[in-house]
Amino acid sequence: VVGAVIRPHLQPLSILYASSMGLLVPLLSAVLPIRKALSATLSDALDVNRNRVQGVEVSIERAGANALPLGLLAAGSVSAGLGTVVYYLFPRALLEFNLTLLLYIFFGLLVAMIAGLTILALNLERPVEHVLGWTLLWWNPKAVRAVMHKNLTAHRLRNRKTSIMYALSLAFIIFVIKTFDLQVATFAVQEQQRLGAPFRLSCDRKDTSHYLLRAVDKFLETEAALSSASSPPAEQVVTDYALLTHSLADVQGAPTVVSTLGGVYEDRMHVIGASPNYMEVVLPGLSSLRQRLPHTTALQVTEELYTPHGSQSLVVGSVYRDRLGLHLNRSCLLQMRGDGGEEVKELAPLAFADAIAGSLFSPYPGAGTQDTLVSLPSYVRLSGSAVKSVADLPVHHLLFQVREGASEEALEQASHRLNRLADNVGCNLESIWDRTKGLKVAVSAMDFFGAGTTGVALLISFFSLVSSMVTNINEQGKEMGLLRALGVTKGWLRRIYTLEAVVLVLSAGSLGVAIGSLLAYTISAQRALITQLPLPFSLPVVPAGVLVLTSMVSAFFAAYLPAMTLARTNIVKLMRKP
């Protein structure tokens, strides 16, 4: 970020936000327990010998009660707020170009999506717990699993808060991790798409062709000699190159216009000459042809431009097909202005491209004036008197192909030799590694920040789990005494409550990972649709596994220690426990 002001001290507003959150969180967290304690009837509060675990609840409501319908009020408020955001705040942010408000809206919608999906996923909590209990825990005795499931049912309301915390935490963490990975991948793929090759030599001058290409050919000969002379002989790092010329508009000093035969619709384009091996040199997987003439040979589209039919054709962006109504093998007019005045050529589209690495192609009109590829002889013919022959081509870019599997050391040495070549010919060298080396620092910083945030979130969830499990175990002291009187061992009791916590956390964690992965996939699909880049998406197996495993370990300690402490208590004391 250029021009950003980074202050070395805390701002008063930040201190106010942090202090407010530090005071509000304890206050709000105490509301529900206090309301639950005060909602008990006087007889229930005084009867300390009655079991607190309720497997069945009966609720009786008076039809004429004057209580406020809190659920309807909450649903109406949320709907009204959403309508205000969509119909007022969002258009206002677009009209005023208020990026801050727009980001706040997107962040609020994101949080609402995560919270909404988490609440919806709670309906799947019990089925997931049953599946996990009867599949992953099959090695446990059937009686242990049956008691564990009964405990999960009896403690469902109290455990729901813990499930929500774990699901929300893991969903948000997985979403942030995958979104950052997507941002890094987008930047890397955009640089690959822009450069088109691992190394690109750019020349702003338009009169360097007569010695530039000779210098490059000599460079490749030297590379081959160095590879064969090394002991043992090594494979050549830089194996081939392709070239792109300056556009006809830059050479002629006037825009190039394409139009239909009747001249009703017209648009500007950059006509560029490409070498026949261009599609073989550029990085694979970054080019996409939407439509192409049926071909019977294995020629690449840039090689087909050098056939008799291709010499009267061009490769056009897909946006021109939609904007001008162009069709394959149907002629269009190319209007150029040179020293001899305006000249019109009749050519036909050979293919329509959504993207070609190293060139500007896009199916969207917002990309501006796009490139169009022709063969080098066609480029000379279309330029009129501006370019005399192929030997005088105004070379703009040279894209270098490297051997697949080359080591970083070999690539660094090749980069130094290409830099010397660039200095000798007066051009500028760009490489993907130089453009993306700063990402390693950003990734390291994000990993450190993510580890700290994850630790804090899991620690808070762990305390919630400990509170729930201690309460659950202490409330079932009489049941534990009864089971021990019937012959159930202490090990089985510890196992029952430990498995209850593990299944609870594992089900909530699985739902959270699924929610975070689903949201990350939607963001990835949206980004790929907008940028037209082959952005990879992979399931977060490693971070999800680490998070779930850490949660299971915390669940083990949260339940095992209280259960072990209570299991050591005398049976008579357990039976008398209030």
Image (cartoon, rainbow, N blue to C red):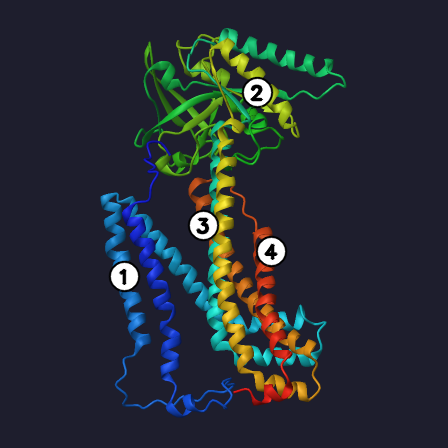
Answer whether labels 4 and 3 touch (C-beta < 8 Å): no
Query: Which is more N-terminal, label 1 or label 3?
Result: 1
Marks 1 and 4, the one that precedes in the sequence: 1
Tag 1 and tag 2, C-beta contact below 8 Å: no
| 4 or 3: tag closer to the N-terminus | 3
Q: Residues within 10 Å of mark 2 (few under 14, many from 20)?
A: many
Return the residue at label 2: 415
Question: Which residue is the site of mark 1?
Answer: 83
Characterize the local packing of mark 4: few (<14), some (14-19) or many (20 or more) Cα atoms within 10 angstroms.
some
Q: Relative to residue 265, is residue 424 drawn left or right? A: right
Q: Of callouts 1 and 2, which one flags the residue occurring earlier in the amino acid sequence?
A: 1
Q: Is residue 39 visible?
A: yes
x, y percent for residue 191 = 48, 32
According to the picture, the residue beneath numbered tag 3 turns out to be 523
Amino acid tagged 1: Gly
Q: Nearer the viewer, residue 302 or 167?
A: 167
Disc 3 residue type? Ile
Label 2, label 3: how far apart the Cα atoms are = 36 Å
Helix, strand or loop at mark 2: helix
Q: Amino acid at mark 4?
A: Gly
Give, as a three-letter code, the residue at label 2.
Ser
Q: Is residue 554 above or below residue 541?
A: below
Label 3: element kind? helix
